[in-house]
């Protein structure tokens, strides 16, 4: 069976993988995200060793996903200075003349989950990560959601929790969703590592209050058939009950679909592919672009 490659470029690590479109991961390595000079030679070495037909890249952002743009494939206005305006796609194209797909880390995770994970068989889902940042990717009618550029669903505005005076830490918006609810915001607000706050119910009530508002807006705008919650913060599984309760209150019976009104535990779920959602989606993206290239 043909081997396809994936690069999941994250803020803390790059994961490279080779696998099949049925979801079998043959090889997988993790490389720390330092500078392009240090990180990229290791990525290139991986694909020199593991020959693949095509590569699907999912990157932290913002990135340029417009294939008519002169800077297509670049990481753009990231706060990570070493990676600002870095031509990630071209750096790989220079080394390998094979088809490549380029999208956001969360969009490819959504693709992985839609085809082989928790949303398997559905033509629509939303994948949200709550980790160092907050981001979401969506599959709509079987395709990766894209407009002018990729969505930036982590930076929406939310209503304040009445007991939360924390100023927020998004460098662009202060108290947007990411500024209030990503891992580093939890840690700055409470002065402790998120993992050490497991027993403090107030922490997770506030967290659930914000995430629920985001989910309400995503449900109202995109109407996903399944919502998948990934990212380090979601390892605190008890946040889910706060999210579900707040979401129910917010929607207030307006969305009467049984998935939302009576079967929410099967509607808002953890990734079916665990930590492999992103690379599986990358492999699937690679197989899609490869098929397009041979049909040309
Ligand atoms: P990244 O977003 O860089 O890909 P993660 O999704 O693991 O990585 O997110 C890292 C953030 O998640 C950290 O800032 C930390 O606050 C939080 N985090 C990681 N593990 C846990 C945990 N077990 N419980 C709560 N928060 C966690
Ligand atoms: Zn923001």
Image (cartoon, grey):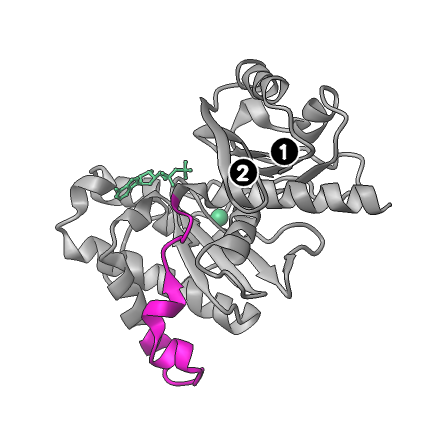
Circles 2 and 1, Cβ within 8 Å, touching? The answer is yes
Q: Is mark 2 within 8 Å of ligand 1?
A: yes
Indicate which disc residue 75 carries.
Answer: 1
Quarter of the image where the C terminus is located: top right
Q: Residues within 10 Å of mark 2 (few under 14, many from 20)?
A: many
Which residue is drawn at the image coordinates 43% and 85% (left, top)? 256
Give percent across and percent down for residue 98.
75, 30
Q: Nearer the viewer, residue 173 or 76?
A: 76
| Position in image of residue 55 (x %, y %) | 65, 34
Residue that badge 2 annotates = 60
Vertical placement of residue 77 versus 237, above or below: above
Dividing the picture into quadrants, the one containing residue 206 is: bottom left
Q: Is residue 175 visible?
A: no
Q: Which residue is at the front of the view, 83 or 106?
A: 106
Would you say residue 235 sits in the magenta stretch?
A: no
Write down the region rendered in magenta. 248-274
Residue drawn at the location 46% of the way across and 25% of the way down: 29
Q: x, y percentage for residue 180?
A: 36, 51
**Circle 1 Cα neighbour tier, 10 Å, few/some/many (<14 / 14–19 / ≥20):** many
Of pointers 2 and 1, the one earlier in the residue sequence: 2
Which quarter of the rendered image does ligand 1 occupy?
top left
């Amino acid at each position: 069976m043909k081997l396809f490659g994936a690069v999941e470029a994250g803020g803390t690590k790059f994961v490279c993988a080779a696998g099949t479109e049925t979801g079998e991961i043959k090889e997988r390595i993790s490389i720390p995200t330092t500078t392009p000079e240090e990180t990229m030679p290791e990525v290139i070495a991986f694909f020199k060793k593991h020959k693949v037909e095509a590569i699907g890249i999912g990157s932290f952002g913002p990135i340029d996903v417009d294939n008519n743009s002169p800077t297509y494939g670049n990481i753009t206005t990231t706060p990570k200075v070493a990676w600002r305006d870095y031509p990630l796609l071209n750096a790989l194209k220079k080394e390998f003349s094979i088809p490549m797909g380029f999208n956001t880390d969360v969009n490819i995770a959504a693709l992985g989950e839609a085809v082989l994970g928790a949303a398997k068989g559905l033509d629509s889902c939303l994948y949200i990560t709550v980790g160092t940042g907050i981001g979401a990717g969506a599959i709509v009618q079987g395709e990766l959601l894209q407009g002018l550029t990729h969505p930036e669903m982590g930076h929406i505005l939310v209503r304040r929790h009445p007991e939360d005076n924390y100023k927020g830490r998004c460098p662009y918006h202060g108290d947007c969703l990411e500024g209030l609810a990503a891992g580093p915001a939890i840690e700055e607000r409470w002065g402790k590592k998120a993992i050490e706050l497991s027993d403090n119910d107030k922490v997770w009530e506030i967290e659930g209050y914000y995430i629920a508002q985001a989910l309400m807006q995503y449900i109202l705008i995109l109407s996903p058939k399944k919502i998948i919650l990934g990212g380090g913060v979601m390892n605190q599984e008890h946040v889910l009950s706060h999210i579900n309760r707040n979401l129910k209150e917010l929607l207030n019976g307006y969305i009467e679909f049984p998935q939302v009104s009576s079967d929410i535990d099967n509607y808002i779920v953890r990734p079916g592919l665990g930590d492999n959602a992103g690379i599986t989606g990358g492999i699937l993206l690679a197989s899609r672009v490869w098929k397009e290239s041979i049909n040309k």
